[in-house]
Image: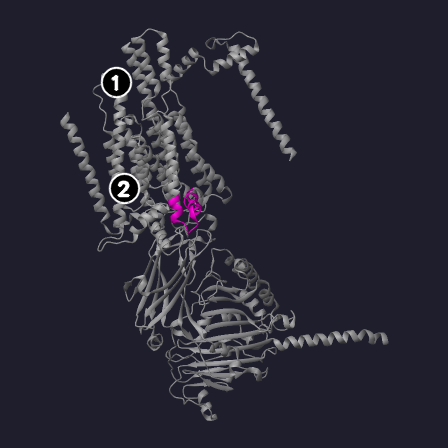
Amino acid sequence: MAEEQNKKPCRFWIWASASVVFRLILISFPGNLNLSSRPEVSTPLTSIRRLAEGYWLKQASMSPYAGSMYHGSPLLLSVLGPLTVQRIKGQPSHLLCSLVFVIADILSAMLLRGIGQKLQMAYGLNARLLGFLKSSRDKVILPCGDIAALVYLWNPFTIVSCVGLSTSPIETLAVILALFGAVTRRVPLAAFGFVMATHLSLYPATLAIPMIILLGYGLDAPPIKLFLQTRSVENEKSSTSTVTKQAKSKQTTHLPFLWKTVMHFLFWVLLWSLYVLVLCALSLNKYGGVEEMFKRTYGFILSIEDLSPNIGVFWYFFAEVFDFFRNFFLIVFHVNVLFMLLPLAIRLKHRPCFLAFVYLAISSILKSYPSVGDSALYLSLCALFVNELVDMKFSFFLFCGYLGISLLSPVMHNLWIWRGTGNANFYFGNAIGYACFQIVFVVESVSAMLNHDRALRRSSSNHGEVNS
Amino acid sequence: MACLVRSWIPLLFLQSFLVAIAFGSNEGEEFSEELLLKPLPDRKVLAHFHFENRAPPSNSHGRNHHLFPKAISQLVQKFRVKEMELSFTQGRWNHEHWGGFDPLSSMNAKPVGVELWAVFDVPQSQVDISWKNLTHALSGLFCASINFLESSTSYAAPTWGFGTNSDKLRYGSLPREAVCTENLTPWLKLLPCRDKDGISALMNRPSVYRGFYHSQRLHLSTVESGQEGLGSGIVLEQTLTVVIQPETTSVETNMQPSWSLSSLFGRKVVGSCVLAKSSNVYLQLEGRLGHESKNVDTEIEAHKLWMNSDFDLSLKPDRVIRESSSLLFIFDIDKSSDSEPFDLGLTWKLPSKWSCEQAPLHASRFLMGSGNERGAIAILLKATESQEKLSGRNLTTDGRCTIKANIFQIFPWYIKVYYHTLQIFVDQQQKTDSEVLKKINVSPSTDKVSSGMLEMMLELPCEVKSAAISIEYDKGFLHIDEYPPDANQGFDIPSALISFPSHHASLDFQEELSKSPLLSSFKEKSLVRSYTEVLLVPLTTPDFSMPYNVITITCTIFALYFGSLLNVLRRRIGEEERFLKSQGKKRGGLKQLLSRLTAKIRGRPIEAPSSESPAAESSFLSSKLIFKIILVAGAAAAWQYFSTDK
C-alpha cells in the first residue's frame, strides 16, 4: 500500500514533466502551428498579436487603446509587451512569450494540485466524520489534486491556448491563484488573485460569492444537516437528557461564519484593487487614464463591439440582430450571467469550490468572447470533484460532444472563411452545439453534485438507523 | 410727356448703374478656355481641356457675378473653403506610357472614382462640420454620392503625407463611385458657354466616355487680394483629361495613328466661346530633340516644324515654342467660323517612337494572402528608367544620394491594420525601420468610428532597384446592415498616394505667353505624385436571410440553460418532500402560522392539514381564485386609468 502511494506521486511527476516537454516541443515549431490565428484560441481580448500592436502604439507614444486593437490590461501590456519584440537569434520570434505561458501553465497546475490535496483531505475528514469510511473501506478516495493537475496539463484545450499565444493561461493562473489562496486561507493571496483575475477578464468578478463563502465557512463539505443528523443520532445514543440535546443542536444549526476573515479579505481586495488601479493610471497617465481603460476593456467586453467569429454565440447574434433591439439583448444576455448566481449560491453554499467551478463554467458559456482556454479552466476544476461526480450522467456523451465540436470547428471555419463554400451558419451551428454541450455539462454536474449530497444523506440516515 | 420723362429718368439711371456694375464685374472676372492635345507613345491621344474662371475679391464688386458660377462662390463663402479639389475619374493612368514626371500627370492622374480634398479657413473645431456640409453641398451640385464622405469612417486628416501641410485639410475618396455623364453635365453647367460653344463643344459624351481614361477635375482656390477688407478672389479651375485611342485604318503596327479633332471627338470647333478671354488649342509633341536647332525664328524653319518628313499638321500653328524636349504648337481658334471650322489634324508619315518622362519610382500595390480572415497589403516601388537621370539631384548632407518618397494611405476601419507588422524590403532585403524610414505618422482606425491613416516618408538610396512595404491586416466582420447591397463584390481600399517631396515637375516654355493659365500652371513646380491601384478586398458575409432564425435559436439556447439549471436546483425527490412536510408538521413553519392566522380571522377551529376535507379545500381554492381575480382586475383598472391619463 505504502509502495503504491510512493509510486503515485512519482507517476504524477513523470506525466507532468512529459506535458511540459510536449509544450516545449510544440512552441519550438516556427509559426506557432498557426494556432494563434484560430478564433477558438485567441479572441480579441486574449490575442497576443493585438497585444503586440498595443505595445507598438504605446512605443510610438500613442495610447495603446488607440484604434480598436488592444483591449487587455495595461499591466499585461507592460509585462508581455517587451517580450513580443525581443527576439533570440535563430529562434522563433514568439518564443519568449510562449515560455511565459508555459510557466503560467505549470504554476496553475501546481496550484490546482494544492487545491486538490486540500479538498481531498477535507473529503476524507468529512467522510470519516459522517462515518462511511469505517463501514466501506473498499471505497477509495481518488487523489483529485493530481488528477486535476494532469487534466489541466494534458487537456488539449490548455495546450492549444498555451502554444497558440493567447493570454488566457495568465487569466487562468489568476483565477486559480485566487481559489488557492482562499482554500489555503491565505487571505492576501486570495484577494490578489481575485483582483487580478477580475482586472484581466471581468467575469471572475462573480467568484466573489464563492470566495467569501469559502473564507467564511471553510472548505467543501456535505450539507450541515447531515452532521446534525449524525450528531443527533450520536446524542440520542449517548445522552437521554433533552436539554443538552437541544442546546447541542442549536449550537450546530449554523456553522460559524468567520466575519473577521471575510472582512480581512474584503480589505485586501480593496487594497489590491487600489494598487492595480494606481498602477494602471500611472501607465496610462498620458492616454486618458483609468477611465479610458475601463471604456476600452470592460466597455468592449460588455458592448460586444467586435463581431469576429468565435466559439460563443454572441458574435453572430449581434451581427444579425436588428439595431433597435441591440441594447435590449445586450442587457438580457449579461443579466443571464448574473441571474443564476444567487440560486446556485443558496443551493450550493456548503460547496464553495464547486460553486466557483459552476460560476466559471457559466461565464465561459455566456462570455462575450469565449475561447477554449476558458473551457480548459473549468474542465480542470471539474476534475477536482472526481470523488463527488463519479455518478455524473452523460459523461461519455459529453466527452464525444466536446471532441466532435473541437474537430468540427476548424473544418467549419475553413469551409466558411477560407474556402468560401460554406456560409456563416455552418460555424454558428457549431458554436450553438458547443454552447449546448456546455450547458448540459453544467446542468449535469450540478445535478450530480446534488444527487451526491442526497446519497450521502440517505446513506448517513441508513447508517444512523443501523447504528441505533 | 413730362410725367413720362420723369418716369424715364430714374429708369435710365438705374440702367446705367446696372451696366456699370455689369462691366465692372466683367473687368474682374476672367474666363479662358484651352485644350491641350498630346499624342502618347502607346498610340493614344491625350486631350486635356482646361477652363479657368477667376472671380475678383468678393467685397470689391459685391455678390454679383457675370461669368463666375454663383453656386461655387456661394459654396466658398458659406463653408470658408480655402482650397478644394474634386475629381471624378474612370480608368487608371498609365504612368509608364503616359508620363509620370510632368505637371500634366502629377496634377491630372487621379485615383478611380471620386476624390475630394479641401482646406478650410475656419477654427480647428469646426473643420469637420464644414467638411460634412461641403460634402452634402457638392453631392447635390454634382449628382454624385459625395455625401458618403461625410461619415468619419471615410475621410482622414493628413498632416504631411498629402503634400499640403495644413491641419485644416480633409481628404476622402470614394473608389466605388461610377462616373458618367450625369456628373459631367453639372460640371459643364459651371462653364459660361456650357458645351454649346467654344472648345467645350467638343465634349461629345460617347467619345469622352469611350476613352481609356477620363478624369474631370474641379480645383478651387481663394486668392488673397492683398488689400485689407477686400476679401479674397476665387480661382476656379476645371479640367477634363481624356485619353482616347484614335481609330486607325493603317495596318502598320509600329506607325502612330493619324487623327484629327473630328475623328477623335466626332465634332469640330466652331468659333470660340465669346465670353472667354482667350481660347487656345495646344499640341504638344514630346521627344523631338535631335533634328531642330534651338531658335525657331525664321518662317521656313517654323514651317519645317509643322510640316516635315515625320508628320503633317493640317493647320498652320500661330506660334511654336519649345521646351527642353517637347514642342508646343499654339493655335488660336478665334478665327474659325461656321464656314471654316477648326479641325486640327495630325498625320504621321514615318513610324515614330519616344518615351515619356517617368517618376523616379513606379508604385503599385497589391494584396497578399488568401481567405477572408486576414491578409497583407504590399506596396511595391520599382525603379524606372528615368531614375538614372534624376538621381544626381538629391544629395543629402553626408553626400549620399537618396530618393524621398511619401506614402499616404487611408484604411477603412474594417481593414484592421497591425502597424507593428510593417516591413520594409529594399532590393529584397529586409531593412529595419531606422535605416529607411525617416518619418511615420499613424492614426489607427476605430471600429465603426474612424478610418485609419498611415503616412510615412521613406528615404531610399538612389541606386535602389525595388522597394517593398508590407503590412498585415485582419478583416473585420460587419453587422448585416453595414454591408452594401452587393456585399459579395467586396470592399474597396482607396488608392495610396505616393509622392516624391524632393522631386518637382514643371514645364517652362519660357514665353511671355505665360499669361495663358494652362501654361502658367505647368510652369509652377508641382509635386510628383502617383496614385496606386484601388484594392478590392472581399469580406466574409453572414447569412443575410436568417436574422430571425439566429435570434430564435440563440434565445432557445438561453432558455435551455436557464430552465434546465433552475429545474435541477429546485427539484426535490419524493423522499425530501416527505421529509420537509414532516418537518413542517413538527415545527410549524410559516405556512402553518398563516393557516392559523386565517383560521383565527375566519373564526374557525384550526384544521389539521392532513385531514382537510375536500369541501374546505374547494372553498379555500375559491377564495384564492377570487383574490386572484380581484388582483388582476385591480391591475387592469389601474393600467387603464394610467394609460388613459396619458
Quarter of the image where the C terminus of chain A is located: top left
| Amino acid at dot 2 | Ala
* Figure label count: 2
Q: Earlier in the sequence, mark 2 or mark 1?
A: 2
Looking at the image, which residue is at 26% across and 22% down? A125
Task: Point out the stretch of residues depicted in magenta.
Answer: A278-301
Please report, as a chain letter, where disc 1 is located.
Answer: A
In the shown orientation, is residue B464 left or right of residue B577?
A: left
Where, by quadrant of the figure, is residue B586 drawn?
Answer: top left
| Amino acid at dot 1 | Phe
Q: How is the image coloured?
A: one colour
User: Rounded to the nearest whole Å, what is the CA distance between mark 2 and mark 1?
Assistant: 39 Å
In the shown orientation, is residue B332 left or right of residue A122?
A: right
Please report, as a chain letter, where disc 2 is located.
Answer: A
Q: Is residue A222 above or below residue B38?
A: above
Can residue B490 be seen from the camera position used here? Answer: yes
Question: Which structural element holds mark 1?
Answer: helix
Can residue A401 be seen from the camera position used here? Answer: no
Residue B577 placement (x, y as % from top left): 40, 17
In the picture of the structure, the residue carrying the numbered disc 1 is: A132
Asked whether disc 2 touches disc 1, contact meaning CB atoms under 8 Å apart, the reply is: no
Looking at the image, which residue is at 27% across and 18% down? A129
Say which mark, if any, is on residue A104: 2
Residue B207 placement (x, y as % from top left): 50, 72
